[in-house]
């Protein structure tokens, strides 16, 4: 499903060129559960942004579901993000003036889904996340765990194939964090490809496949044997 | 993205920052309202002046001594001074069938006194025809008598304010007042209702033209008012008057004739230009409002960096983000314009109630132009912040926590 070949990403910092990704090649099959770990500045966030089509590699090739994305126009990349990719962020990034239901509906609004269909899909998603009674609450009226669940609802409402989570438990307490991870794993169990970037070894270890980044390289790539 | 969703999103984000939005609304609406009110003021003034002129009568010609236009040709051999415009000149005009009435006018300033009270006013020397020609009437008594214009007679018709100040509530008719060193009998009081542009019926006294010329020791007339038989005959009357005067003045056309139309169109042009100027000045305030919108939208963009990044991550394209921010700017401008229209309406209503004889009427183009300019400024000044928002790098935008 995801094929990265010799992907590099350079950033210009002052006069210097900093190589955030150096010769990264990675294949992720559909339905995989993968964690990316590594120290700060090792390039794991850059990798996630490249995977999420928010950032463009300087060199190399990235095929998503067989489509070469590096040559696509911005409009087409936006359409792919809209249809195939869901994001979960450490800081939730909910729109503060919108209710939980409206936040969940936002990707559908951007995609031009008609309101009646939006409503039923939002209801479905909120129900599956056990947030029905919080639908009309604004983010500041929700707990951290609830906020992240709303954010996850927003990420999956378009039924993406790929879910990218950047430190999804970074702003949560132990208990809520575990709930959120359990939810993400449940979604993975339903077939979605899950990539989690994290500092937290205990969370990273749970993934079937664990990629460790160092100085822009893939340092190690461990794979459990898939439970057959 | 569907249009209603786009508008709703823009509207909610405007509501999300009510102070900011209200301030911008205020700036925009004041701009629009001032354009409409100021042009209404100019247009009102124009109509007022035209109305005043039309009250004077459109069949009126005014003759003054001296020539205002150069007609070309060789310069005169002898230095010449314009001949006096005399009472005989004026009376000669009456022989033309196109001219109905003629009122020679001599003007000067002089103290008028009764008993111990004295006032310096304008003295108008004229004939009985002055009253119908200028649409002036007497409230009490009678106007100057019909008599040969060359005849002196010590009678006067007083302005209403002058009468009040000299006589207060005493009876004035039949009394003798002193004008300069002569005594005149009061035969009438002017009616203030006939008051119109350029003629203050309060502080003046009307006496026979021959008496005025003797009083001021000046054989030349100040003006001759000529009333044509009808509006259509004005041009004929004008030519006839010129020919007559040229013949009487040894072949030299040394008088100037002004028609009401010429004066009217001059005033019309001046006041239209004034209205446009004022509209331009008010337009600047609209531009200022536009710059304010740009400013505030730029602040909004930098405050909402993470939201913009999020929209992009959720699949919003550059074009969508651009549209969202443009929609906000245009929405602000539009509601500002609407509020401005309302303000202007209320303002005009108030002014029209307070000053009943001066109507504020905006020219037809004012409201559409003001609203159009408001929307255009919203769009133009909205583009820059919107582009900045659209081009925001989502990676960096989302990195802000």
Image (spheres, coloured by chain):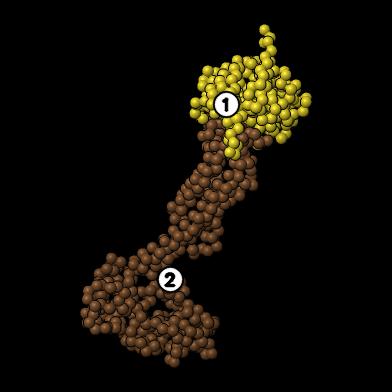
Chain colours: A yellow, B brown
Local SS, label 1:
strand
Residue B274 place in picture, x, y as percent: 44, 62
Q: Horizontal and vertical percent for residue A102?
A: 63, 31
Residue B51, visible in the rendered structure? no
Q: Quick check: do tags 1 and 2 share a chain?
A: no
Q: Are marks 1 and 2 in contact (CB under 8 Å)?
A: no
| Host chain of mark 2 | B
Q: Residue at x 23, y 80 (%)?
A: B76
- A38 or B199: nearer the viewer: A38
Q: What mark, if any, has residue A8 been given in the picture?
A: 1
Residue at the far bottom in the pictured view: B181
In this orientation, which residue lies closer to the viewer: A13 or A33? A13
**Which image quadrant: the C terminus of chain A?**
top right
Left or right: B311 as drawn, with respect to A167: left
Looking at the image, residue B270 lies above or below residue A216: below
* Mark 2 residue element: loop
Chain of the residue on which disc 1 is drawn: A
Task: Find the distance from the CA under tag 1 to the CA under tag 2.
Answer: 85 Å
Task: Kindly identify the residue that appears in the image at 51 percent across and 30 percent down.
Answer: A74
Name the residue beneath numbered marker 2: B197
How many labels, in total?
2
């Amino acid at each position: 499903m995801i094929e990265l070949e010799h992907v590099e990403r350079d950033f210009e910092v002052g006069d210097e060129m900093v190589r955030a990704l150096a010769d990264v090649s990675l294949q992720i099959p559909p339905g995989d559960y993968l964690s990316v770990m590594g120290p700060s500045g090792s390039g794991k966030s850059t990798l996630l942004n490249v995977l999420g089509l928010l950032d463009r590699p300087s060199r190399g090739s990235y095929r998503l579901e067989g489509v070469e994305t590096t040559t696509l126009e911005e409009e087409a990349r936006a359409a792919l993000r809209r249809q195939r990719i869901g994001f979960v962020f450490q800081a939730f990034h909910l729109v503060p003036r919108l209710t939980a239901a409206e936040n969940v509906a936002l990707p559908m609004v951007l995609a031009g889904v008609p309101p009646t269909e939006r409503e039923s899909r939002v209801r479905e998603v909120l129900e599956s996340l056990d947030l029905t009674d919080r639908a009309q609450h604004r983010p500041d009226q929700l707990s951290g765990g609830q906020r992240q669940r709303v954010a996850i609802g927003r990420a999956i409402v378009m039924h993406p194939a790929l879910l990218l989570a950047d430190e999804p438990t970074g702003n949560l307490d132990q208990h809520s964090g575990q709930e959120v991870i359990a939810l993400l794993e449940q979604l993975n169990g339903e077939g979605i490809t899950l990539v989690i970037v994290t500092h937290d070894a205990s969370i990273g270890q749970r993934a079937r496949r664990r990629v460790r980044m160092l100085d822009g390289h893939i340092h190690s790539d461990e794979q459990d044997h898939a439970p057959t | 993205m569907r249009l209603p969703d786009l508008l709703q999103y823009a509207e909610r984000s405007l509501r999300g920052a009510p102070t900011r939005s209200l301030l911008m609304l205020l700036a925009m609406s004041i701009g629009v309202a001032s354009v409409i009110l100021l042009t209404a003021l100019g247009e009102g003034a124009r109509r007022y002046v035209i109305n005043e002129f039309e009250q004077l009568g459109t069949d009126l010609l005014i003759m003054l001594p001296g020539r205002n236009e150069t007609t070309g040709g060789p310069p005169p051999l002898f230095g010449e001074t314009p001949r006096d415009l005399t009472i005989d000149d004026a009376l000669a005009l009456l022989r033309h069938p196109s001219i109905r009435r003629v009122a020679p006018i001599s003007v000067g300033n002089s103290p008028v006194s009764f008993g111990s009270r004295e006032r310096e006013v304008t003295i108008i020397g004229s004939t009985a025809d002055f009253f119908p020609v200028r649409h002036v009437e007497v409230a009490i008594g009678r106007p100057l008598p019909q008599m040969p214009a060359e005849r002196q007679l010590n009678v006067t018709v007083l302005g209403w304010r002058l009468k009040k100040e000299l006589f207060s509530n005493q009876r004035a008719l039949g009394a003798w007042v002193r004008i300069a060193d002569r005594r005149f009998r009061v035969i009438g009081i002017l009616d203030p209702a006939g008051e119109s542009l350029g003629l203050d019926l309060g502080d003046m006294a009307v006496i026979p033209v021959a008496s005025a010329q003797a009083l001021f020791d000046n054989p030349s007339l100040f003006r001759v008012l000529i009333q044509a038989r009808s509006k259509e005959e004005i041009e004929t009357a004008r030519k006839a008057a010129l020919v007559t005067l040229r013949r009487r003045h040894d072949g030299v056309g040394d008088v100037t004739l002004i028609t009401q139309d010429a004066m009217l169109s001059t005033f019309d042009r001046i006041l239209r230009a004034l209205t446009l100027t004022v509209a331009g000045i008010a337009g600047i305030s609209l531009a200022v409002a536009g710059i304010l919108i740009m400013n505030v939208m730029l602040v909004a963009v930098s405050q909402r960096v993470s939201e913009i990044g999020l929209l992009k991550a959720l699949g919003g394209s550059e074009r969508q983000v651009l549209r969202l921010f443009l929609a906000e700017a245009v929405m602000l401008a539009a509601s500002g314009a609407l509020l401005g229209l309302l303000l202007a309406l209320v303002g005009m209503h108030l002014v029209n109630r307070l000053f009943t004889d001066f109507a504020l009427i905006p020219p037809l183009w004012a409201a559409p132009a003001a609203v159009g300019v408001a929307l255009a400024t919203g769009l133009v000044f909205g583009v820059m912040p919107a582009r900045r928002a659209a081009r925001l790098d989502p990676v960096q935008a989302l990195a802000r926590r």
